[in-house]
Image: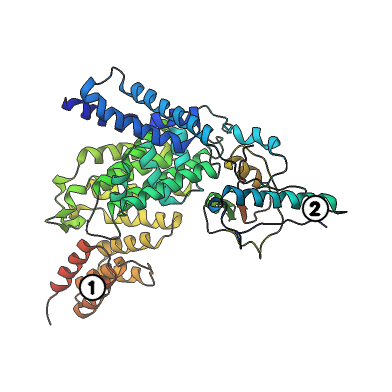
Amino acid sequence: MGDASADLERVVREEWGRLVALLLAQFRRLDLVEDALGDAVEAASRTWPADGVPANPPAWLMTAARRRVLDRLRTEDVARRKEPLLLLDAEQHQEGARSMADAGSLVEDDVLRLVLMCAHPALAPEAASALSLRLVLGVPTADIARLFLVPEPTMAARITRAKKRIVGAGIPFAVPDAGVLPERLEVVAQTAYLTFTAGYSPGTGPDLLRADQSGEAIRLVRVVLGLRPDEPALVALLALMLLHHSRRDARVGDGRLVLLADQDRTRWHHDEIAEATRLLARPHLAGPLTPLAASYVLQARIAAEHATAPTAQDTRWDRVVGLYDVLLQVAPTPSARLARAVAIAEQHGPAAGLDALEGLDLPQSHRPAAVRAELLSRAGDVDAARAAYDQAIAACRNEVETEFLVAQRDALPDR
Amino acid sequence: MKYLVLLVGDGEEKPWSEQTEEEQGAAMAKFGAFGDACDARDGVRILAGEALSGPRDATVMRTTGGRVHLTDGPYAEVIEGMGGFYLLEAPDLDVVVELLRVLPPYDIQIHPTVDVEL
């Protein structure tokens, strides 16, 4: 029965987050709940092929996991050892610490509570990303380790620590008050953005891009957006991610990086570009926005200019430069300045671009040197271009990009 | 005069989890003896005492430009910056953070106590 494993895979993919959230709502023990659900899936993988897929697969998993949690709770009760006692009046404290009351005044979906818990600002951002993929999307730890380029035991330990921290530090499984909810959703957005970026542009290692990870980040945003469809930061972020993600097949050719201008635009995923454009047309993105939401909107509009230009030559660089000018007012980051310099060079020529690069410092990054090298080469200053390429190559940590830079340098005309 | 006494690190004592049951019992007896000694001494009284959970559970709350940042470290400087303390009962971390926002924007280290089972 090959269907059973496919069914199980689908149920895990679609229902994992909801099952974790439901079990957590009942037991409030993250450490037990997730292991128990993992055990239930393992049991399903053994029994479903033999006994057939149950009529209601999520309910089957829920029941199996619930039994495991109860078993573990019973065992713990028996084996409970005395904890270190440095207290004067234990009874007085029992009640408050036991009832993890739901502090939120809103009644919300359990999955939203799960998402907000995983992206709690008291967790380190990388831990929050990994935990969201694991608990909300059910991505196996081995896959998360691969996505974040760390060994599986390292990632397993990181996720375990994050789970323990949620329990130990009293991070709530709750939707916060309406007043701070948008702020928390921005943390969720940043978590997803971090996950996406780690996949879109890995800082180290052999892969030029890891589309799987970017895809999972998009899935995470879709889940949250399904729960809060009008949150501007999430709408804009989804548009931004889709626009970048739509180019995944065209960004690499023969294992090499293909620059935006040289990409085969027919290989872009135009359905995703269309969806992003529709998202960006939503009226509430024009209203007053938080700085983070505004920066996502502007980045997405810039990406949309590129995505909707019929050819690279048709790019409306004046608009792109204008959008970068606004973006720099909202979020004056060095990367935005660098990208603006590239746009200026396209609109006004390499000399203007080099002027715009003046004084830009992006520590640990090869990109400013790479851009300067390209502009110097266009301006005909071959010696300075070669020196800038050498500088960029020395700083670059991604193997495919290094290869690209070496090829560019070696293609410079001899004098 | 009132004193906050912080028991930081294990010193010469083995970590609690590595002690045998007898050693743990002996340590507990010393805590008890300390309590009795305080009671017996004129003008000495223990106002509050708790066991803290591990440093991994501690949260640092900083306010910069009116925006509250929560992190799991690096921890706030203790010796240079300790200005006072509270011992709070609250349902979860968010409630604590919400209440602490009323205070001036100090750097704050929030440390849960161990929930002791008797």
Expressed as whole percent of the image width and height from the top left, the position of residue B99 reads 65, 43
Describe the element under mark 1 as helix, strand or loop: helix
Q: Which mark is residue B37?
A: 2
User: Which quarter of the figure is the C terminus of chain A placed in?
Assistant: bottom left
Name the amino acid type tagged 2. Answer: Ala
Q: Whole-percent x and y of residue A102?
A: 56, 31
Residue at horizontal 22 percent and vertical 37 percent from the top? A271
- Callouts 1 and 2 on one subunit: no
Is A379 positioned to the left or the right of A234 in the image? left
User: Where is mark 1, residue-wise?
Assistant: A389
Q: Is residue B85 above or below residue A168?
A: below
**How many C-alpha atoms fall within 10 Å of the one at disc 2: few (<14), some, or many (≥20)?**
few
Write down the quadrant of residue A39 in the picture: top left
Query: In percent of the image, x 36 and y 42: which residue is there?
Result: A133
Image position of A97 with respect to A165: above or below: above
Q: Residue furthest bottom?
A: A415
On residue A410, the disc is none
